[in-house]
Image (spheres, grey):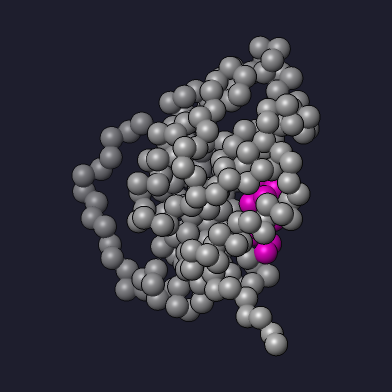
Amino acid sequence: MSKASSNVVWHHATVTRERRERRTGHKTAILWFTGLSGAGKSTLAHAVEEALYARGCNTFVLDGDNVRHGLCGDLGFSEEDRQENIRRIGEAAKLFLEAGVIVLTAFISPFRRDRRAVRNLVMHGDFLEVYCKAPIEVCEERDVKGLYKKARAGLIKDFTGISSPYEDPVNPELIVNTGTDSLETCADQVIKMLEERGILSAPKVSN
């Protein structure tokens, strides 16, 4: 990694996050979906985004595969590169937060220290860790890319859950059982969490 420039100064914009939130009518947050490959992170993140979009929210999904086509296209899958991958995503997510966007990220992000580092980038309550919990057996059954099979055959190094560890979240804001519960149920749980935390207004009940 190249050394950071010392000749930069943070510019404080006049259009603030708070002004953007007032205009959109909702708060902003980072929804950090984490779990094994095949646990349903991307599927759930996009389902939640659809629900938020239907409510008029400003949203964006940062997906693991998509990000590695561009922003992190120079990184491999060593522990060091994975750490840098999550660092970049954390910084990007922070910018989306300031832009008045509810940003949803779908990354394995296997190491607690890396997830904690992203949490520490933002204010308390801005980082909401959503643990997509699914047994590895279920994830392997869903493995349309055949990655687990290749990993078990030794064709992929440092594969999470096989030759590299996944560190379960200790105190996530939400655990969704993506291995057993329906997509609709899991998405509803995420939306309910956002309402309970005041990021979204609860829908009005008509008489």
Seen in the image, is 12 located left or right of residue 153?
Answer: left
Q: Residue furthest left?
A: 6
Residue 119 horizontal/vertical position (percent):
40, 47
Q: Residue furthest top?
A: 154
State whether residue 143 is above or below residue 12.
above
| Number of marks in picture | 0
Placement of the N terminus among the 4 image quadrants: top left
Residue 53 horizontal/vertical position (percent):
65, 67
Residue in the image at 62% along x and 19% along y: 162
State whether residue 201 is above or below residue 77.
below
Placement of the C terminus among the 4 image quadrants: bottom right
Task: Say if the magenta span includes residue 56.
Answer: no
Residue 96 horizontal/vertical position (percent):
47, 58
Residue in the image at 28% along x and 35% along y: 3
Seen in the image, is 50 located left or right of residue 124?
Answer: right
Q: Nearer the viewer, residue 130 or 12?
A: 130
Snapshot quadrant of residue 125: bottom left
Q: Nearer the viewer, residue 15 or 196?
A: 196
Residue in the image at 59% along x and 25% along y: 160
The residue stretch that appears in magenta? 42-51
Residue in the image at 41% along x and 62% along y: 98
State whether residue 192 is above or below residue 105.
below
Q: Residue furthest bottom?
A: 207
Task: Say if the magenta span includes residue 44.
Answer: yes
Q: Decide if residue 84 is in sight here.
A: no
Q: Main secondary structure of the magenta part?
A: helix
Residue 88 horizontal/vertical position (percent):
44, 42
Q: Decide if residue 25 is in sight here.
A: yes
